[in-house]
Image (cartoon, rainbow, N blue to C red):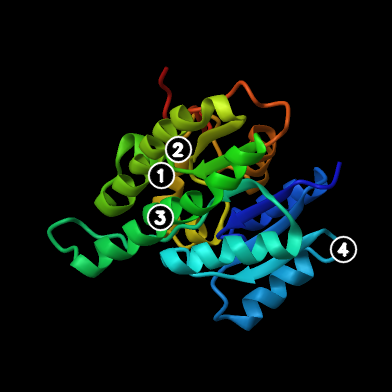
Amino acid sequence: MSKRLAVVTGGIGGLGTPICIALARAGRRVVAADLGGNPERIARFEHEVDGLDIHFAALDVSDFDACEAFVRDVEAAHGPLDILVNAAGITRDTTLRKMERAQWDAVLSVNLDSVFNLCRHAIGGMVERGFGRIVNISSVNGQTGQFGQTNYSAAKAGMHGFTMALAREVARKGVTVNSISPGYCETALVAAIPDEIRQGIVDKVPVGRLGHPDEIARTVEFLSDDGAGYITGANIPVNGGLYMAF
């Protein structure tokens, strides 16, 4: 059987790159979809994944028509899209009293609309072929809420609602749809948090540390495996115990 094709949005980001690497090492051909406006960032990514079956493609995930063209072009170049990981995300943090409409729209567009944009154009082929794995990267803050993140928390909570609904629609078609809710991980985004605030976050995590991006990547690799066909509509928390529920 030929390699399964995986697309990872936000593929050159702090979580996206380890996800791409984990999938490639598991024998998948990977396309990392991300904004194309920063050549230096793209060059660093390509150096990091050199030697692996990983390809970069520029994409604005908030653009519905661009996502349609992207799926069509990727499948023409690489074959059927079997695995879709929606990892693209941004923050525009501020309290609701200070939040501008543009800050709300930007976060919802990139973090939630993108999931619709990609899934809408990928799901038909998955259903027709009788196989598909969709993994949506949500957040612990979509479960708990977070001060100054009404936009982000709403988008991430909405992502899992979308996950459960789509999982029901395609459960009998060989397609699984799951989400992962990472806690605070060692990424550039978290590193930018002031030291005293970041330490306060770590102090609240029962395991006593930030997560490693590779730990999120391993969970994606597990959920996207051919043998994970009986797991669908699930949300997998990978947060060091920061939020526990059943």
The disc, 4 or 2, on the residue closer to the chain's N-terminal end is 4
What amino acid does circle 3 point to? Asn
Query: From mark 4 to mark 2, how far is it between C-alphas?
Result: 39 Å
In what element is the residue under mark 3?
Answer: helix
When asked about the image quadrant of residue 245, the answer is: top left
Residue 51 marker: 4
Q: Position of residue 180 (x, y in %)?
A: 52, 37
The disc, 4 or 3, on the residue closer to the chain's N-terminal end is 4
Residue name at image x 29 percent, y 46 percent: 154
What amino acid does circle 1 point to? Gly
In what element is the residue under mark 4?
Answer: loop
What amino acid does circle 2 point to? Asp
Question: Of residues 246 and 234, which is closer to you in this image?
Answer: 234
Label 4–label 3 contact, CB within 8 A: no
The disc, 1 or 4, on the residue closer to the chain's N-terminal end is 4
Q: Which residue is mark 2?
A: 203
Query: From mark 3 to mark 1, how far is it between C-alphas?
Result: 26 Å
Q: Position of residue 105 (x, y in %)?
A: 27, 63
Q: Position of residue 98 (x, y in %)?
A: 15, 63
Label 1–label 2 contact, CB within 8 A: yes
Q: Is residue 38 above or below residue 246?
A: below
What amino acid does circle 4 point to? Gly
Residue 200 marker: 1
Quick one: quadrant of the N terminus? top right
In what element is the residue under mark 1?
Answer: helix
Q: Position of residue 64 (x, y in %)?
A: 42, 63
The disc, 3 or 2, on the residue closer to the chain's N-terminal end is 3
Query: From mark 1 to mark 2, how far is it between C-alphas?
Result: 5 Å
